[in-house]
Image (cartoon, rainbow, N blue to C red):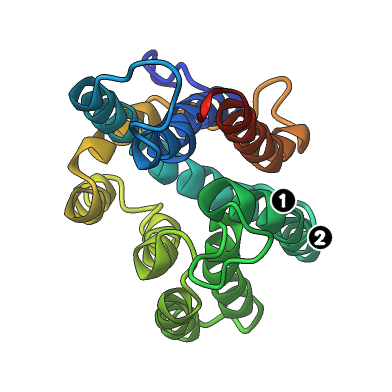
Amino acid sequence: MKPYKILSMRDLKIIAYVTMLIDHIGAVILINLMANYGSYSFPIDQNSLYELYNILRTIGRISFPLFSFSIVEGFIHTKDIKKYIIRLFIFALVSEIPFNLAISNSLTFPAAQNVIFTFLLGIIPLYIGKRVNNDFIGLGLIILGAFLGEYLHTDYGAYGVVLLGVFYYLRNFEYIKYLVWGGLIYSNTPYGLISLIFVALYNGKKGMGAGRWLYLFYPVHLLILYLIVVLINNIYIV
């Protein structure tokens, strides 16, 4: 093993979750503060708030490529792909209401669906392509999944679905994959290229404590951020 391969899948997931939390603090809490600017009983510097928002969202761009990579690695190494997909689907359903509350303050929000649905639209085509042993069918279904991602307004949409397919189908092309991965990521979020540094340090090991409980972080942290917004608004809006 190369000496610089120092990060396990657990490490990648922790980095992804931390940067996602930073991103969502901006997307949920700071968005709310900016939307209600002038209504609070405490002073807010609007320019500073906007600058902080941009910083948090920029850092957060690191998270999605790491999550996409980890989902594809999970698909490749899982002992039961069907159970893996079912597990993702359950977490997508569980996460939808916390996601809606966090981004829209409503139990339903047809204009956006949580990111786990995006992962499903990428993983299911890969599963079908693997079952029929035909990469062309898998790639065709990835394109269909990308259209569905846009139509259903899943988080990251077509880009997210295509990124999963690129991670999967180029995984064995050592010198080409980073160039293509980087180009695709840069086209959506230039700062997200930092995520590839972490991917390059991945040692292929699962790591201790990389279990399914990490999935719970997604709906739970969204719900907590929503409750923080409710608390701030109930106490400080005059």
Label annotation for residue 78? 1
Left or right of 99, for residue 95: right
Q: Which residue is mark 2?
A: 83
Q: Residue at x 68, y 39 (%)?
A: 223
- Relative to 176, residue 195 above or below: above
Residue in front for this viewpoint, 160 or 200: 160
Percent position (x, y) of residue 218? Answer: 64, 40
Residue in front for this viewpoint, 50 or 140: 50
Task: Give the number of the mark in front: 1 or 2.
Answer: 2
Of callouts 1 and 2, the N-terminal one: 1
Residue type for callout 2: Lys
Q: Residue at x 26, y 50 (%)?
A: 185
Question: Which quadrant is home to the N terminus?
Answer: top left
Q: Residue at x 78, y 59 (%)?
A: 90
Left or right of 216, for residue 10: left
Percent position (x, y) of residue 20? Answer: 48, 34
Quadrant of the image occupied by residue 190: top left
Q: Pointer 2: residues within 10 angstroms few (<14), some, or many (20+)?
A: few
Label 2 near label 1: C-beta < 8 Å? yes
Left or right of 98, for residue 194: left
Residue 26 in sight here: yes
Residue type for callout 1: Thr
Percent position (x, y) of residue 46? Answer: 24, 27
Disc 2 element: helix
